[in-house]
């Protein structure tokens, strides 16, 4: 039995792959621990039995003052992580990105504990870029033009309840069944999607609006105006800040409107659902756009630039798709071709190999 310490930033995009790997490793009989930040509590399963340790961290970006303030926090987090590593004696540490993963990974490298990085996006994030030089292996979700033996494509692990849907089929609504549209703005919600998507759906013809059921994950600050827009448009909707029952909602969906976060893309691919991607334009490296582009190239999705997208333009795209389900069926099949199956098992094998 091996002791494996996972470290991840406290957002869904970092945590969900970590939890998927934890499930696989524990299934194989290994002990797993998680180091993260306080935000993680929101995304952990209610029945979580993985020991969780909150490690101080900060994001050293922004102005000079913010960067200077973050340094002592990261140093203190590293000291705490050193104590944690000496207590748990992990055989390997796996980092999933985000600056909260930085102190445990740095502590592990200082103590000569083998470290493995997992990168969910098409390109390395800032924290992973710094840590990659000393990592034994870097696991990639997507192929990259990196000629180095330590970079291995494993895919992006998805939660067990999502992986269980891999063999399901895309079913078109029949008779009076509703057309289910799932709107997901990442694990923390998206103000931009809350502004543009309800307005786009409100612009649809009345006969189409009456056929819709919209499940919209929105920030708490946006929930009121999102729900009011759907009510005004006479569209049935379920608006929540976070859905713990995400798997059945994704399985029932006929069209997904979302950002291009790596975990969202991986889960949509596994289940095989057509999608409209509206990537976050504020990432300097445009990681979400690059994540979505492979799906667009395969014919499984549409992608729009948030800066030039209008509710009318999005409304036309939605209308075009839900008015002709043969398009959505073809897109669903194309999306599934982009899925990387058994990513959790592949990553677990890599981790255990390094842990030896």
Image (tube, rainbow, N blue to C red):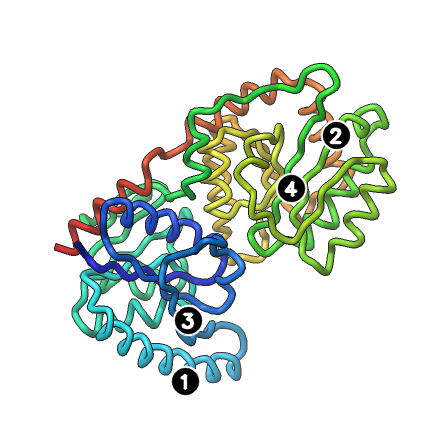
Sequence-wise first label, 1 or 3: 3
| Numbered mark located on residue 183 in the image | 4
Residue at 21 percent across and 47 percent down: it is 350
> Which of the numbered marks, if any, corresponds to residue 212?
2
Which of disc 1 and disc 2 is earlier in sequence?
Answer: 1
Q: In x, y percent, where is residue 115? A: 23, 61
Q: Nearer the viewer, mark 4 or mark 1?
A: 4
Asked whether the beta carbons under mark 3 and mark 2 sit within 8 Å of each other, the answer is no
Residue occupied by mark 1: 72
Residue 159 drawn at (x, y percent): 42, 43
Dot 3 or dot 4: first in sequence order is 3
Q: Classify 10 Å Cα crowding around label 3: few (below 14), some (14-19), many (20 and above).
A: some
Q: On the image, numbered disc 3 is attached to which residue?
A: 54
For the N terminus, the quadrant is bottom left
**Which dot, 1 or 3, sits closer to the camera?**
3
Q: Nearer the viewer, mark 3 or mark 2?
A: 3
Q: Give above or below for 17 relative to 155.
A: below
Q: CA distance from mark 3 to mark 2?
A: 42 Å
């Amino acid at each position: 039995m091996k002791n494996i310490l996972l470290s991840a930033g406290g957002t869904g995009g970092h945590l969900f792959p970590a939890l998927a790997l934890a499930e696989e490793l524990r299934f194989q009989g290994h002990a797993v621990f998680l180091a993260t930040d306080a935000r993680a509590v929101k995304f952990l399963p209610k029945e979580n039995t993985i020991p969780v340790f909150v490690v101080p961290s900060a994001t050293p970006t922004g102005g000079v003052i913010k960067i200077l303030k973050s340094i002592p926090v990261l140093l203190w987090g590293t000291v705490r992580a050193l104590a944690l590593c000496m207590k748990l004696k992990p055989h390997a540490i796996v980092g999933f990105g985000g600056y909260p993963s930085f102190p445990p990974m740095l502590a592990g490298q200082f103590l000569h504990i083998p470290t493995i990085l997992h990168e969910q996006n098409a390109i390395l994030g800032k924290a992973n870029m710094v840590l990659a030089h000393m990592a034994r292996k870097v696991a990639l979700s997507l192929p990259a033009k990196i000629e180095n033996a330590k970079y291995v494509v494993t895919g992006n692990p998805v939660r067990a309840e999502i992986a269980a849907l891999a063999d399901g089929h895309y079913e078109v609504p029949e008779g009076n069944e509703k057309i289910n549209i799932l709107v997901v703005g990442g694990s923390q919600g998206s103000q931009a999607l809350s502004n543009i998507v309800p307005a786009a759906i409100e612009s649809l013809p009345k006969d189409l609006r009456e056929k819709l059921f919209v499940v919209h994950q929105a920030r708490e600050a946006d929930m009121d105006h999102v729900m009011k827009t759907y009510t005004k448009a006479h569209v049935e909707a379920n608006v929540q800040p976070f859905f713990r029952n995400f798997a059945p909602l994704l399985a029932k969906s006929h069209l997904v409107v979302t950002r291009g976060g790596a975990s969202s893309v991986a889960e949509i691919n596994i289940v095989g659902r057509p999608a409209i991607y509206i990537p976050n334009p504020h990432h300097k490296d445009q990681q979400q756009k690059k994540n979505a582009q492979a799906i667009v190239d395969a014919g499984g999705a549409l992608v729009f630039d948030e800066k030039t997208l209008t509710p009318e333009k999005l409304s036309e795209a939605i209308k075009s798709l839900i008015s002709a389900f043969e398009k959505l069926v073809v897109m669903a099949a194309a999306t599934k071709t982009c899925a990387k199956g058994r990513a959790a098992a592949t990553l677990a094998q890599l981790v255990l190999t390094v842990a030896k």
